[in-house]
Image (spheres, helix red, strand yellow):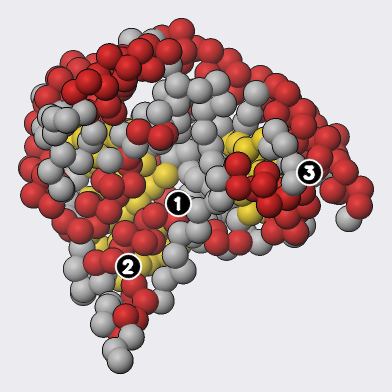
Amino acid sequence: MARAEELVLPSVAALAPYEPGKPVEEVERELGIKSAVKLASNENPIGPSPKAINAIKQALNGLNRYPDGGSYYLRQRLAAHHGISTNQIFLGDGSCEILNLLAQAFLRPGLNAVVSDHSFVIYRLAVAATGGHLKTVPLKDLTLDLEAMGKAIDEHTRLVFLGNPNNPTGTIYRRATWERFLRDVPPTTVIAADEAYFEFVRDPEYPDSMRYHDGERMLVTLRTFSKIFGLAGLRVGYAVARSDIVAMLNHVRQPFNVSSLAQVAVLAAMDDHDHVRQTLAVNAAGIAYLEREFDRLGVAYAPSQANFLLVDVGDGYAVFERLLKLGVIVRPMNSYGLPRHVRISVGLEEENRRLIEALEQVLERR
């Protein structure tokens, strides 16, 4: 009998699959605990916009109809928001779909993509699925080293993936570094600027890639409604790029890739400025509290500009398991090549406090 791994690309067979966490309810059942706190997936702790919820309720009677396959009204709204043409907007089933489609459109065996190590795992999965070669560049001080990444680009490089802020470190590269990088990237390389967490950034030197679309360079800005808008369960992301790049993405996407409920929810959430302000306030307070407590506990962490912190706890998986038994769920970073670390999402005030109390117990026992 033929084995599946014998019939697929070697790069696919060699991959470690993405490991999702268990549902909170299942964790509670298995461990016999109640009211577990989930701080593992960089989700919005205050929930979705009430306006989005109401929009979904009003749209439920139309679920017998397929969604608008072109996301017409949402593209119109995003184009007006950014002051660009609708043919520069691509809607996806979350940013992950767009990352996969970029690889599918621009890579093949013999071509390569440049990524940083310890960056979003989907970059590697997307490249492997195409048979393209992955060129990995080390981080520098837990931050993307754009100078080294630029030097890694060659005549066969078609994609470079840049997370800013980077997941899982939460760190950013700054404007001067970014602008030097742009000067060195050849015109045949697509720059995928993945800015899923950009709304949370507080540093004034952050380079919003939307300001660098000049109609010439192959720049793709990726944004998501999963994080600050609290719509992770609906899976909606979008890309801004030259119209010819958007056209190529439309060649390879599936029809009806963004659900009707997702489209109406996003349109409503974009009007809920109070929800966004509240989310930013909760995140800023949570980051400040967690940093103070980690300093008190003598625990090292990366300087985050996102809604999570990468924390060095010595043995990430062991600490993850011990926290789990205390009803606190964080993300171990072994699959990201950071076995000493866990990634901790910012929660509500009480959730953050429970984390610190549990972590203090775990560290004392260690």
Mark 3 residue element: loop
Separation of marks 2 and 3 at Cα, in angstroms: 37 Å
Q: Which residue is mark 2?
A: 128
Left-right relation of 320 to 195: right
**Observer able to see residue 115:** yes
**Near-viewer residue (260 or 225):** 260
Work out which residue is located at the far bottom of the displayed protein and give it.
1
Q: Specify the quadrant that holds the N terminus.
A: bottom left
Please rate how many residues cluster around mark 3, counting C-alpha atoms within 10 Å: few if below 14, some from 14 to 19, many from 20. Answer: many
Which numbered mark, 3 or 1, is in the foreground of this view?
Answer: 3
Q: Are marks 2 and 3 in contact (CB under 8 Å)?
A: no
Q: Which residue is mark 1?
A: 120
**Nearer the N terminus, badge 2 or badge 3?**
2
**Nearer the N terminus, badge 1 or badge 2?**
1
x and y, in percent, of residue 328 in the image:
71, 41
Left-right relation of 313 to 95: right
Separation of marks 3 and 1 at Cα, in angstroms: 28 Å
**Observer able to see residue 310:** no
Separation of marks 1 and 2 at Cα, in angstroms: 14 Å
Quarter where residue 28 is shown: top right
Work out which residue is located at the far top of the displayed protein and give it.
274
x and y, in percent, of residue 305 in the image:
55, 32
Please rate how many residues cluster around mark 1, counting C-alpha atoms within 10 Å: few if below 14, some from 14 to 19, many from 20. Answer: many
Which numbered mark, 2 or 3, is in the foreground of this view?
Answer: 3
**Near-viewer residue (182 or 85):** 85
Please rate how many residues cluster around mark 2, counting C-alpha atoms within 10 Å: few if below 14, some from 14 to 19, many from 20. Answer: many
Amino acid type indicated by mark 1 = Phe
Task: Judge whether 136 appears above or below 259 on screen.
Answer: below
Amino acid type indicated by mark 3 = Leu
Q: Which residue is mark 3?
A: 326
Q: Please report the residue visible at 54 percent of the width from the left and 59 percent of the height from the top.
A: 336
Amino acid type indicated by mark 2 = Ala
